[in-house]
Image (cartoon, rainbow, N blue to C red):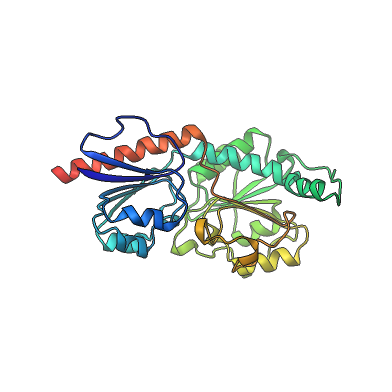
Amino acid sequence: MRKILVTGDFSIGDNVFPEDFELIHIRCPIDEQQILDVLSDVQDYILGGPEYLSARFIDHATRLENLVVMGTGTASFVDIEYATKKGIRIANTPHMNIQAVVEFTLAMMTTCLAKVFESVERVKDGTQWIQTPWRSLSELSFGFVGMGGIGSEMAHQLHLRGCRNISYWSRSQKVELETSLGLRYESLDHIVNTVDVLCILITSCDETYHLIDEAVLKKASSELKIFNLSDSNIICPVALKKYLLCNSEAFCFMDGYYSEWVRNQGQYNDAHGLLTLPSKSLIVTSHLAAQEKETVNKLFAQAVRRILEFGCDRLK
């Protein structure tokens, strides 16, 4: 009997796994110990929850053979180098969350640019009745950092909404998109200095760690609105805090943070000091972009298929 651990706040139907699998589903893990208590007996693991499979976790997972991350950003949830060293096979479920992330990002752009979060705070504390006119997305200029599947679809959706001022920086040039959507391939320094909205949708890796650093932000417009849907570490937290404090009209939205889940102790114990900033400057959400219900179901179904494929490979 193989034990499989699944984490994530979603339902699992009957007969999803063969009869020789024993399912352990931790729907909403409350702490690391809850996972560590079962991890030593698990051969297969579908990671759809908020945890990070660190070296400490991997050392407990003495029987773990196969790991599938529900999503694309594997490095955000697994110490890939250490897991590989331990002989654990790793897979993810790419290209399945594109529509959900794009829908969420467009919604957050409109919400944040209309100062909705700031308005909520001011209404609650009775200090201000905000009615500042907000600009339609079609009137804004956009710059993209990364132009993969999500970035391409974002650019397409903005183009459909009438946006005609879109530039991008990517590790490879996308000539076809330039032709079809009128995109301009520009340097990162030029983009941050000239656009209204910077959308970060690039894969996290050693090459992109702190890609947006103090040198880049020094060249940024004083009113730049940043939307980071990638790993938080694409942006250097020290540089970001300095930039936001020095530019009262600048703003950053992040779906995810430098310290997540149980490591997140809130604004009063934040090593980076960013969470103390007002919503006028910073909004952080807890990796919500890909949590659309049908997308999660599809991600899980694909993760199950990958686990079963690993099993077939094992029997060959």
Extreme left residue here?
316
Number of labels in the image equals 0
Q: Please state the horizontal and vertical placement of residue 97, each as a whole percent of the image.
A: 47, 40
- Residue drawn at the location 47% of the way across and 35% of the way down: 295
| Residue 310 drawn above or below residue 63 | above
As drawn, which residue projects farthest toward the top? 14
Q: Position of residue 210 (x, y in %)?
A: 54, 65
Q: Is there any visible trace of residue 99 in the rendered image?
A: yes
Q: Residue at x 39, y 62 (%)?
A: 54
Closest to the observer, 179 or 202: 202
| Position in image of residue 236 (x %, y %) | 58, 66
> With 76 as the anchor, is 65 left or right in this view?
left
Tell me where residue 192 sits by quadrant. bottom right
Q: Place residue 57 in its image quadrant.
A: bottom left
| Residue at screen point 58% across, 37% down | 103
Residue 286 picture location, percent across and down: 56, 50
Q: Nearer the viewer, residue 63 or 304?
A: 63
Q: Is residue 216 visible?
A: no
- Indicate left or right for 233 with 223 as reference: left
**Looking at the image, is 132 positioned above or below residue 81?**
above
Q: Which corner quadrant holds the C terminus? A: top left
For the N terminus, the quadrant is top left
Task: Describe residue 295's horizontal placement relative to residue 24 as left or right.
Answer: right
The residue under the point 23% across, 55% down is 63
